[in-house]
Amino acid sequence: QVQLVESGGGLVQAGGSLRLSCAASGRTFSAYTIGWFRQAPGKEREFVAAIRWSGGNTRYADSKGRFTISRDNAKNTVYLQMNSLKLEDTAVYYCAGSSSWLGSFGSWGQGTQVTVSS
């Protein structure tokens, strides 16, 4: 399995930006897709964005263009650039790996907290 470690979370004011990183190690070839998910307190975990490791295909939930997912193959790292952050973006953000395009995500990181303040 692939091991995933998120970083880059923190406290930011509404309207600000953050870039999350997801570093992959181990059986990285098995991470055909890397996805970002988030879970806010009292809510279900929800899909945010995903990228195909080779080819770079992307898929987004409805972030209205505020979020951008990208990858750096040389660094085995996937990024989530988040702009124009809103209070409702506050959540723990997780990256996850799937061995197929948007299939079942079986490898998960520990999560990174993003808090947006007013």
Image (cartoon, helix red, strand yellow):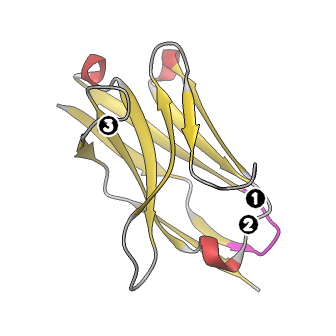
Q: Earlier in the sequence, mark 3 or mark 1?
A: 1
Q: Could you tell me which residue is drawn at 53 percent across and 43 percent down? A: 21
How far across and down, in percent of the image, does residue 20 sit? 57, 49
Q: Judging from the image, what secondary structure is the residue with disc 3 in?
A: strand
Q: Earlier in the sequence, mark 2 or mark 1?
A: 1
Residue type, mark 1 in image? Ser
Distance from disc 3 to disc 1, alpha carbons, whole Å, reads: 24 Å
Distance from disc 2 to disc 1, alpha carbons, whole Å, reads: 6 Å
Residue annotated with mark 1: 17
Image-based side of 73 in relation to 98, left or right? right
Distance from disc 2 to disc 3, alpha carbons, whole Å, reads: 25 Å
Q: Could you tell me which residue is drawn at 40 percent across and 79 percent down? A: 43
Image-based side of 86 in relation to 2, left or right? right
Image quadrant holding the C terminus, namely bottom right
Q: Earlier in the sequence, mark 2 or mark 3?
A: 2
How far across and down, in percent of the image, does residue 32 sit? 34, 23
Span of residues in magenta = 12-17
Residue annotated with mark 3: 97
Q: Judging from the image, what secondary structure is the residue with disc 2 in?
A: loop
Mark closer to the observer (3, 1): 3
Q: Is residue 34 magenta?
A: no
Residue type, mark 2 in image? Leu
